Amino acid sequence: MSRLDASAPEDVPAAARETLDAGGAQFGFVPNMLKTLASNPAVLDVVTRLQTSLSRVLDARTRHTIALAISD
C-alpha cells in the first residue's frame, strides 16, 4: 500500500499557499491532510470548499469527532 507524504513548505505550489495559510489561521496549525493535498491546488480547493459547506450542515461536536477520527 502506497502512502502519500505531506509536502515540505518550500515544495508547496504558490496556488496552494493561501489556502494553507487560511487553514493554519483557522486551526492554529496546518493539518497534515491539508499539507498532503497541497501538492494539487485544485484538490485542496475542492476539499476546503467541501469542509466549508459541511460546517453549515454539521454541528461543531460532529465535525470535531470526524476530525479526530481521521487525524494522524
Image: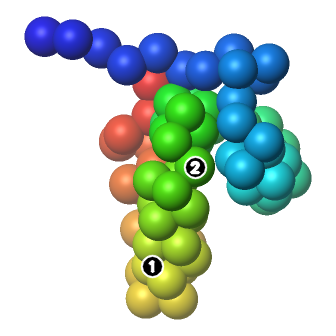
Is the image coloured rainbow, by chain, by secondary structure, or in one colour?
rainbow
Q: Quadrant of residue 12?
A: top right
Kindly state the secondary structure of the residue where label 1 is placed: helix
**Up-down: is 36 above or below 46?**
above
Determine the residue located farthest toward the front in the rendered image.
14
**Quick check: 62 left or right of 34?**
left
**Up-down: is 3 above or below 43?**
above
Q: Please provide percent x and percent y for residue 45.
A: 56, 62
- Say which of 61 and 45 sits in front: 45
> Residue at label 2?
41
Q: Residue at x 77, y 22 (%)?
A: 9
Q: Please provide percent x and percent y for residue 28.
A: 83, 44
Q: Residue at x 49, y 83 (%)?
A: 53
Q: Quadrant of the C terminus?
A: top left
Callout 2 environment at 10 Å: few (<14), some (14 to 19), or many (20+)?
some
- Say which of 24 and 68 sits in front: 24
**Up-down: is 63 above or below 14?**
below
Determine the residue located farthest toward the bottom in the rendered image.
56
Q: Which mark is residue 54?
A: 1
Q: Quadrant of residue 32?
A: top right
| Whether residue 26 can be seen here | yes
